[in-house]
Amino acid sequence: MTDSSSAGAAGPSGSPEGSAGSLTPGATGTHGASVAEGSVVHDKRHGFWSLTIGSVGVVYGDIGTSPLYAMRESLLHLGHAPSTEEVIGIVSLLTWALVVVVTFKYVFILLRADNHGEGGTLSLMALAQQALGRASTPLLALGVVGAALFYGDAILTPAISVLSAVEGLKVATPVFDPYVLPITIGIIVALYAVQSSGTGKVAAWFGPITVVWFITLAVLGAIHIFDAPVVLHALNPYHAVLFLVEHGWLAFIVLGATFLAVTGAEALYADMGHFGRGPIRLAWLGLVLPSLVINYLGQGALAISDPSAIKELFFLTAPEWFRLPLVILACIATVVASQAVISGAYSLTRQAMQLGLLPHLEVQHTSETQAGQIYMPKVNWLMLIGVLVLVIVFQTSSALAAAYGIAVTGTMVVTSILAVVVIAKTWGYGWATAAAVMTPFLIVDFTFLSANLLKLKDGGYIPLILGAFVVMLMWTWIRGVRFVEGRIKRESIPLAEFAKSMSTSSATRVKGTAMYLTSSPDVAPPALLHNLKHNKVLHERNVILTVRTEPLPIVPDNERIELHRVSEEFATLHIRYGFMEDPNLPRALAQAKEYGLPFDMMKTSFFVGRRSFRASASVGMPLWQDHVFIGLVRQSYDATEYFRIPAGRVIELGNQMVV
């Protein structure tokens, strides 16, 4: 870890972590930044319809592959051949889960809860913190838990989606049966291997391909509805309620499988900044929701007319001649869904780093023109390992379905709780109204969560273990950084006092500017003290530089710089970024000229403290947590490269600290 802790190894107080995606703020505040740039800019260039089609691929790729397994697993969980009324009840549950959870909660309510155009758990957490006007540990904990659970979803989605699609080869021809697992592994490895080259060109096809997929879902469903027109009764929520009442505990078990229909709904909110709420709403109401409902109705009708088809229900809705093409299309659709969740993991990690929940990791930009196209090597390969382990251990999509759902429902519960704060404080409706609006959704979320918890012994523990591990890492990083920053402050000299003493010091002055990166601008940085102690020199201009991350996605350029004069020789410079922005110090320092700070890169030296740590059971955190923290520090990306400082202008001064 470096002395640029705030500038490099930030704590929860807002010091930046690695981020990417110099995003342009929306002019009206209703649109955020697209994957490449601000969605308002993107909208002007490519148009509303282009954004709508793009959202179909990126936002709805995950939920769009649910028909591969959701209906089948719901029926199989009955444990017996379903009656007509049972099929109607399950189709009704699937349909109204889409209406209540996705349409009412996310499309109509949460899409309004934007943080300057951005959505997602961490963005909502930052908005809730802002609404309260103070740092809140419970809200921070909720954000951490929600983010951690997302990673469980991020490795389960590629595993179950690709595997369920490739399993369709067995339906097309039994010859492929022995090759399902190798083909699945090959597709997944290839998917993660191409991430480093960028996905911009491929992503351009995501929308149109997924549009074709949803149209195919609707057609396949429509041609079977009249096999058993009675299935249309499922559109009446009475049959969903009747199923729950009549089947009691069994219905509760079935709910765990029914929830598979809405996995991916969280992406709808998280990707709001990429496309804007208008295109996302239109895509859902105009194409995605109707296609999903029609497909589930068609699958239900087939299950009523031919109960033997239930084990391979989705692929048997296709005529025999179309099954192999359908398998290929399904594989492509699942790759799109997997790509969306991989990109989401990159974005979430980037936000977590910026908000001080994780150390900054390497972020590679894979496009010269699209800032949002990023690749994170460590995140990518860790995800690949996790996905492969799941596929090899579980081997079938039905087995994986048992592990799927807990992470998503947990994230949804967190989102609903945070939304209560935003509705009450940010929107000004008060606590009573906020509770009245969100309580029904919380009841639904907790019901689904409870139903999914029944899957614990069958694999549901996997996302919980992964989530607990991520929570532990984030908690350790927050504690460690707070301890280090607190100790630096306790052991340092107040900057004003130090500057006053230097005014009468006989230390040799050298020309130029020295920039000291630090997380504690009120005290003399250790690197400054070391430089003075060992080299006996002081620059004619000394700038104490602190980079802060605000709980906003983007900080306007006119609010980025804050310069304070401490004395003739010393000044403090605060540079502010949003949690969706890339720190670029040379660019910001060039802007600082307007504030009276002369800046010439070739006459400026950047001093960075290179601190090493030694674990001790008697100081700070428990010994095991010390070792975890030290391990995280070692994974941190080099601060020089992270802040884009020319390597030739950097001087590193090291010391050791016991934690």
Image: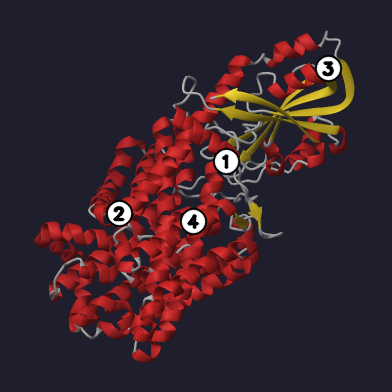
Quickly name the residue at label 4: 383
* Residue nearest the observer in this picture, 497 or 623: 623
Q: Name which of mark 4 and mark 1 comes first in the sequence.
A: 1
Taking 258 as reference, is 409 above or below it? above
* Residue nearest the observer in this picture, 297 or 178: 178
Residue at 41% across, 43% down: 469
Quickly name the residue at label 1: 354
Kindly check if marks 3 and 1 are in contact, taking CB atoms under 8 A apart as contact: no
Quickly name the residue at label 2: 460
* Residue nearest the observer in this picture, 264 or 327: 327
What is the spatial separation of the Cα atoms under label 2 and label 1, in whole angstroms? Answer: 30 Å
What is the spatial separation of the Cα atoms under label 4 and label 2, in whole angstroms? Answer: 18 Å
Quickly name the residue at label 3: 536
Q: Name which of mark 3 and mark 1 comes first in the sequence.
A: 1
Residue at 38% across, 43% down: 468
Callout 4: helix, strand or loop? Answer: helix
Q: Bin the neighbour count of mark 3 within 10 Å (Cα to Cα): few under 14, some 14-19, many 20 and up.
A: few
Kindly check if marks 4 and 1 are in contact, taking CB atoms under 8 A apart as contact: no
Q: Bin the neighbour count of mark 1 within 10 Å (Cα to Cα): few under 14, some 14-19, many 20 and up.
A: many
